[in-house]
Amino acid sequence: MRASLTAVRLLRGYEAAAKGRGDLARRELAEGRRLQIEESEPVLAASTDVDRALVELDAGNREAALEILDNPSTDAGIGSSAGVLAETVRARIDAEAGRIEAARARFAKLGDGDAASPSLRRKLVFLRSRAALAIAEARLEAARNDLLAAADAARSGGRVVDEVALRIDLAELEGDAGRATRRALADRARKLGLEGLARGGA
């Protein structure tokens, strides 16, 4: 019964995040994480912390995202899947904050294996993060390639929310030339009830 309750709270959190309801997403994911800790599932809690950090990062709250990732109670270590995801998100944060050398150092440790990972989640997080570094380094073609690969993988995997978000990122990379695409993607997001993405693409 408790496991079912945990799953419900997490699903509510993911849905709220997609719909742009950040406060609700934070509450539900934090409650899901609390239940995971009570259930003695620190590795699952570490994975949830990555999702919580991504909610903060998508809202522009880099420091809050880092605070979540650096919580020692759920540090799963770089050798675990959650640890790799956390380090990949840290690399994105460094890149977006202009800490290019720090981001490069993290990617040097991570390698390129997750670009072709059988785990769709790891692949999407990795490609989006590596695109952030490419953008910071003004390597726009490399950024386009990674975002396009991630968007295509998301579509193939049925991850509609991720696909729309990544295609919005691609359109933003095109500047004025991508304005019409951004509007079309915002309309698509609105029809899907994804108000958070709709605002981002408008």
Image (spheres, rainbow, N blue to C red):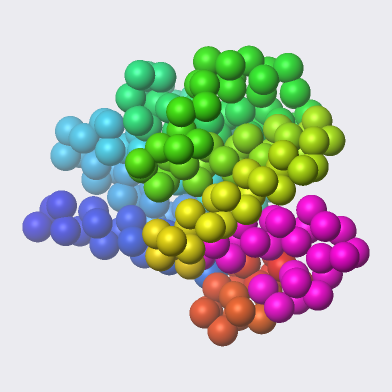
Q: Is the residue 147 above or below the residue 88 in the image? A: below
Q: Is the residue 25 above or below the residue 150 in the image? A: below
Q: From this viewpoint, which residue is outermost toward the left?
A: 1
The magenta stretch spans residue 180:
yes
Q: From this viewpoint, which residue is outermost toward the bottom?
A: 191
Residue located 58% across and 16% down the image: 108
The quadrant holding residue 178 is: bottom right
Q: Main secondary structure of the magenta part?
A: helix
Q: Is the residue 158 above or below the residue 68 in the image? A: below
Residue 78 at what x, y percent from top left? 41, 19
Q: Nearer the viewer, residue 79 or 10?
A: 79
- The number of discs equals 0
From which residue to which does the magenta span run? Answer: 161-185
Residue located 70% across and 32% down the image: 133
Q: From this viewpoint, which residue is outermost toward the right?
A: 176
Whether residue 16 is visible here, answered yes or no, is: no
